Amino acid sequence: MTDDLRVLVERLKAVSHPLRLRVLALLAPGELGVCQVAETLQVPQSSVSEALKELRRAGFIVERKEGRWVFVSVVPQQELTPFLRGLLTEAGNLPKVLEDRARAKEVQALSLPSVCAKVQTVASMAPEAVRA
């Protein structure tokens, strides 16, 4: 397999999972903290971290650290490939993504420490309690 083909296959794999595609589409409008992503999507932070790892590996997102917080965003506009630009446009029209973005605005209105504390509390609960 040629290098170009291999890169495209890896990028397709990165967005072939619903959670990873939702995370990527959620970040298209702008940067969010990892805790904010987890709270918005109502999934464990560990799941978000795994999704971010794959998206970072594919070259779709970047991260920055500010103190103890980690913020993630889609690569800068000038680095968007036609593939990623088209994918973000298409995904941005999905009803679930529109719901996610609306919820993200609500989550962003809360303080980052309170959101992260809530996410970490849920993560420390027993799996049975989380499902209930």
Image (cartoon, rainbow, N blue to C red):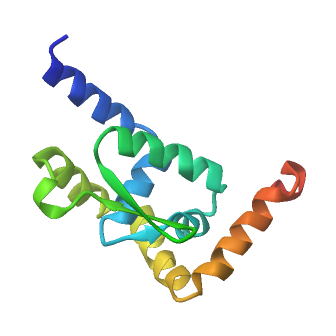
Residue 101 placed where, x, y %?
Answer: 42, 73
Residue 6 placed where, x, y %?
Answer: 23, 21
- For this view, does 33 lie left or right of residue 116? left
Along the line of sight, which residue is nearer the eye, 114 or 26?
114
Along the line of sight, which residue is nearer the eye, 130 or 30?
30
Residue 112 placed where, x, y %?
Answer: 58, 80
Q: Residue at x 39, y 58 (%)?
A: 63
Answer whether residue 18 is visible to the viewer in this image. Answer: no
Residue 107 placed where, x, y %?
Answer: 55, 80
- For this view, does 80 lie left or right of residue 88? left
- The N terminus: image quadrant: top left
Q: Residue at x 58, y 68 (%)?
A: 68
Answer whether residue 97 is visible to the viewer in this image. Answer: yes
- The C terminus: image quadrant: bottom right
Residue most toward the top?
Answer: 1
Q: Residue at x 17, y 54 (%)?
A: 85
Q: Residue at x 48, y 76 (%)?
A: 104
Residue most toward the front?
Answer: 67
Vertical placement of residue 109 versus 44, above or below: below
Q: Quadrant of residue 38?
A: bottom right
- For this view, does 88 lie left or right of residue 65? left
- For this view, does 62 lie left or right of residue 70? left
Vertical placement of residue 82 versus 106, above or below: above
